[in-house]
Image (spheres, rainbow, N blue to C red):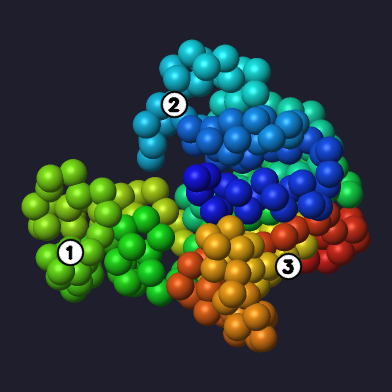
Amino acid sequence: MLHVNYAYVLDSARRLRPDGKILDFGCGNAETVRSGLKQGLDIYGTDVFYGAQFDMRPKLREDGLLDKRVFELIDGHKISFPDKYFDVVVSNQVIEHLDDIDGALGEMSRVLKDDGVMISLFPSKESLIEAHCRIPLAHRFDHDSKFGLAWIRTFRKMGMGSNHKDKTPEQWSRDFMEWIHQWCHYRSNDEAKQAYRRAGLSYERSEADYVKFRLNYTHKDWMVPLFGASPKLTSFAFSRLGGLVVISRKLAPAHTRAVAA
């Protein structure tokens, strides 16, 4: 079954802009692109294809997707499509990896049509669980924090963590702490909101909608009324335990200038 995040962005894109042209920014192995094409969607993907992940280009080329449906980002964030080309831009667990968030969001805004929609899923600094190793608060420690290393190692010895790869708890903890600080740039909700505004994009929290979709998708729809009773509480809880879900639209130029000032 398609991962719920991928299913959500595809379903949202279809609901918000039926028959629209879609871009998956940070598409990785292009699973969303592949699934969207099977569903008859006009979808493209783009990624850097180096560094924090395996190089997917040989497989994408073999499958006939590279440079046809999936394109490499130029200089880390520049999108090789013209202005106002897409009706929907989606990013799934990408924002926290952006070093130059202003440059990347500016590019996403550039290729988005004036009446387009952007859908973003990402963890924030306020998240209680680090999104990649799944250890509580692992992203809150300084790079050289001895307490932080001991904290992560303790949870690893308790059987927590991910992608162990037969490493000792000590080595795994050191490697993951290094990985987090090299490849992740966690920002607070307010910091992310300001970055979106600087890029000329609105910032509308939508965790309650995501939770409802997730419960239905995983056949737990009997829980929908429970979480639907208090959307604000659902949004707060999910943002801390899962992450942020943000729907964005282009702001009027005058509003963007005011935010930048």
In the image shown, does 179 or 172 lie closer to the viewer?
A: 172
In the image shown, does 81 or 260 lie closer to the viewer?
A: 81
Report which residue position mark 1 lands on. Answer: 159
Which quadrant of the structure image shows residue 159?
bottom left
Local SS, label 3: strand
Q: Is residue 188 left or right of residue 128?
A: right
Local SS, label 1: loop
Numbered tag placed on residue 81 in the rendering? none
Question: Percent from the top left, x then y, of residue 195?
Answer: 65, 60
Mark 2: which amino acid? Met
Seen at 67% across and 46% down, the residue is 10
What distance separates the C-alpha of mark 2 from that of mark 3?
32 Å
Local SS, label 2: loop
Seen at 9% across and 52% down, the residue is 168
Vertical position of residue 1 compared to residue 149: above or below: above
Q: Earlier in the sequence, mark 2 or mark 3?
A: 2
Q: Are marks 1 and 3 in contact (CB under 8 Å)?
A: no
Q: Are marks 2 and 1 in contact (CB under 8 Å)?
A: no
Report which residue position mark 2 lands on. Answer: 56
**Residue 150 seen in the figure:** no
Seen at 59% across and 75% down, the residue is 222
Mark 3: which amino acid? Glu
Question: Percent from the top left, x then y, of residue 8?
Answer: 63, 53
Which quadrant of the structure image shows residue 53?
top left
What distance separates the C-alpha of mark 2 from that of mark 1?
30 Å
Q: Is residue 6 left or right of residue 155?
A: right
Report which residue position mark 3 lands on. Answer: 204
Q: Nearer the viewer, mark 1 or mark 3?
A: 1
Q: Residues within 10 Å of mark 1 (few under 14, many from 20)?
A: few
